[in-house]
Image: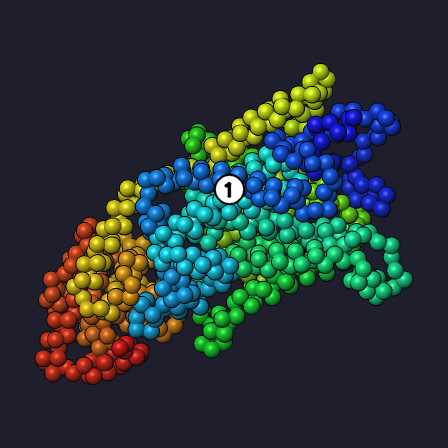
Amino acid sequence: MAGTAPGVTDHPPVTDDPPTGSDAGAADEPSEPTPPAGTAAVEDVEPSDPVDPAADDRSDRSDRLFPVRTWQLGLEALVVGAVAWAWAAVSYRVDDMSLRVPINSTGDARLITNIVRNIADQGWWTTNPDLGYPAGQQLYDFPHAGETWQLALLRVLTLATDDPGLLMNAYFLAGIGVAAIAAFLALRHLRFGFGLSMVGAVALTWLPFRIGHGEYHLFRTSFWWVPLSFVVMLWVLHWRERLLRDPDPPPQPTRGRHLRWTLRRNVRPGRVLVLVAMLVLLAGSETMTTAFTLVLLALTGVVAALRRRDPATLVVHGLAMATIGVTVGLLFSPVLRHVADNGANDEAGRRQVTEQELFGLKLSSMLLPDASHRWEALGQPEGRIRESTIIPSEAGQSIGLLGAAGFLGAVAHALTRGWGGRRRDTRPLHDRAALRDAIGLFVVVAALVATVSGGAILLSLLGLSQIRVWNRMSLLIGVASLAYALTWLERCWHAIGARITAPPGRGRRWFRTGAGALLVLALVAGVLWDGAHVVVDPAAADDRWVADDDYVDAIDEAMPDRSAVFQLPVVRFPEEVPPGNMADYDHLRGFIHTDGDNLRWSYGAMKGRTDGDWQLAVRKDDTVVESLPALIGLGFDGLWVDSFGYGAQWADVRDEIESVVTAEPIVSAEGRVYFYDLGPLRDRLIEKGRSPDGLRQLARERFGIEPGP
């Protein structure tokens, strides 16, 4: 009865043995001797992974996408998502925070709030008439079409609320559980047991990447598309086993007949549709991951074709890349039409070739614990590096202790055992030898491409300089490395389980289940402790948000509806190093806290276009007051002045403005921003004989742009 012992897994046996028959030579590891018939022992079956709820279902599911039924998979996924959400609630102190106040509300987070408000107020992210007055904001030159599916999800959320802070927090916190579920499904697809899949999913979800980017990069931190990319690359690499009924069919007399026979009888259309759906979903999820996937598909396809002597592999990889490319092209079609109509913009969002060196992957940052680690001693090495390095790259590259161990193991595997077989590989992708081969290839290629001044710099020279943040490849390397580490944990559990199920404890299934549960709990606790260390102060965030709200409300009450506000100092949008002590996107404070469309703002029009660059004429003036009559003619009713942009010169600038604008300023609570009503100045200009039409004509002549209504 050894074959029905409690040690049976919920997946077909996964071994390191090479396949036999037509698959011979596909793996390099030696085969173990086959035991004589009738001598099946405990060692002949693999014990189930820790906390294996499917051990009582003995059917062979090797050809199914998942090893358990749909309802059971759904329950398992909800458990994993609940663990991730529960830790998020604790880490971000959800019970103390105001859900309407964004977790991050400075720097790039303000740009994200701009985009979220565009979706809530205008229906989509591309335009907003309340920014960049008088022309309005158009974001086509700074596109987010690569995140179309995420933006569409946000659009759905706006049916419940149009509050930008609530939308951002809901999307960010919900994305934590979704990322965990996506990683869990990917690992279950690879036939890891429930317990180990949960460990890997939680470890990936709570990598320090989450705090390194946060809501500053809202469309990067859900990263449910990272496990999807990993599975896509595995499928394409193992396309024969995944997409063909017979992975190694007998040859036909001619290549033409072989192709026709394959398309008619051997292709599995259902699997092809699943792969296409995954490719389309991936293509519109996150721009950088899509780009990384295309590069890795190209390079691994070449390696696989050469190693396996299989030119068809190049075709399949090429078709997968083409599917992604066509999808991206369709999603970017509005942007392409805008460029065709208005010409290219060489200033907005343009990247230099050498920016890859500034934002490349740093192996030390990826393998060492993050500087923010809970155990200060572990974070010190990376902290010391970041303090003194001239190339800090981005924060949050660490893949954790478990991931780092898996990465080193995968590299060692690739270097010592080579990669794959020298003939067609028909092993299933969840075969552990095949999986380790594939992961070894992925991590080596990814690291060589993404590392600072690595292969990516060559791609930049070839025209791909827009893809500069190669450090974010750490997520793809992380999911692959964690999967490799799980194969070790799986082996360890098999060894432990074999001892537990050996006589005299063969019948102690309860003991094995309990031991597995304790092991999983310990591992989950370990990866959470090693993961992102979130430090938040909800009370301080609330105070800042409320203060800005009150200030903009005071301006709104003092001004007529639909008043237009010109913002000083002039700062171009987007991605401009601001003057003085300002941070980029500080001028969005007013718009973010405006109720409805009561106020319109000068900031936010695209640089490199006339709609935004007319403001440079104000910057060139010797004094601010020289431009005020023309600004009034353009339609502006108020002046927002951020004193942080002037530094030691602020006192002189203030005296200059107040010598002409006699209205008492409205000053922000922290004494930083001054708002001046231009209405009294407009009235005096008219009294002195400057007609409204004359002021509008002055605006046209001075700025070369049509005044607003």
10 Å neighbourhood of mark 1: few (<14), some, or many (≥20)? many
Q: How far from the left and from the top, in percent, is residue 702?
A: 26, 78
Left or right: 539 as drawn, with respect to 694: right
Q: Is residue 57 above or below residue 218?
A: above
User: In which quadrant of the rendered image does the C terminus lie?
Assistant: bottom left
Residue name at image x 59 percent, y 24 percent: 514
Element type at marker 1? helix
Q: Quadrant of residue 7?
A: top right
Q: How far from the left and from the top, in percent, is residue 313?
A: 74, 56
Q: Is residue 52 above or below residue 111?
A: above
User: In which quadrant of the rendered image does the N terminus lie?
Assistant: top right
Residue name at image x 45 percent, y 47 percent: 174
Out of 536 and 514, give the one closest to the viewer. Answer: 514
Q: Is residue 687 above or below residue 55?
A: below
Out of 25 and 269, give the one closest to the viewer. Answer: 269
Give the total number of marks visible in the rendering.
1
Residue for badge 1: 81
Residue positioned most to the top:
504
Is residue 302 in view from this perspective?
no
Q: How far from the left and from the top, in percent, is residue 314?
A: 72, 58
Left or right: 323 as drawn, with respect to 338: right
Residue name at image x 51 percent, y 42 percent: 81
Residue positioned most to the right:
253
Q: Is residue 669 above or below residue 680?
A: above
Out of 141 and 490, give the one closest to the viewer. Answer: 490
Residue name at image x 33 percent, y 73 percent: 135
In the image, what residue type sits under mark 1?
Gly
- How is colour applied across the structure in the image? rainbow
